[in-house]
Image (spheres, rainbow, N blue to C red):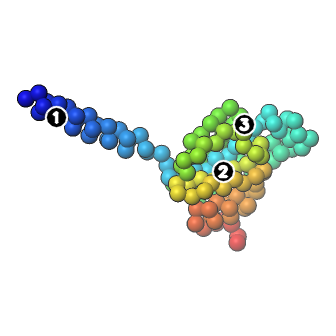
Amino acid sequence: MRTLLLVVTLSANLGTGFAQQRAGDSRKKAAIVAFVDEDRMKDRIDGQAMLQAFEFFLKPIQEIAKRDFSDVDFKILRRGEFLRLPDGTGLNVQNIQPAVGFVLSARGKKRRVLSGVQSDADFACAAAAFFSRSSSSCSK
């Protein structure tokens, strides 16, 4: 009787453990991350102009991501924030070079870093190539 109780208890615990593991793996399959480290930008001569350009193009880029890559998670990261990416790597804004840019990430693919400020068309073409899709904002 004691053996039967032990087997039933172990079976219940194993089944619950596997279910939790699958439920915890609900992250998106792809992500677009805009990142900026304002502190490092302050140390640059052209830092203020780059921050303004980044903010200027961010809204159109968000609209492109929402329209053409709706199943891809879009996030904005700033200094002091860390994000686990779908490709299994992490993104720490304080350590990444350059201080401003975008990261495209998908499960099973090596992430791509777009350095510096990106125009909406440049972003759309890079994202379309990375995610193997078309974008109406990319004229190529």
Residue 94 location (% of width, % of height): 72, 36
Q: Residues within 10 Å of mark 1 (few under 14, many from 20)?
A: few
Hey, which quadrant is residue 140 in on the image? bottom right
Direction from residue 52 to residue 22 in the image, left or right: left
Q: CA distance from mark 1 to mark 3?
A: 50 Å
Residue under numbered circle 2: 103
The residue identified by callout 1 is: 8
Q: Looking at the picture, how far across and down is residue 11, in whole percent?
A: 21, 38
Q: Amino acid at mark 3?
A: Gln
Please tell me whether residue 110 is drawn above or below residue 33 in the rendered image.
below
Establish if 86 lies above or below 137: above
Q: Secondary structure at mark 1?
A: helix
Q: Indicate the position of residue 18 as horizontal and vertical percent values.
A: 32, 41
Q: Residue at x 87, y 36 (%)?
A: 43
Residue 126, image x and y in percent? Answer: 68, 61
Q: Mark 1 or mark 3: which comes first in sequence?
A: 1
Q: Which residue is mark 3?
A: 94
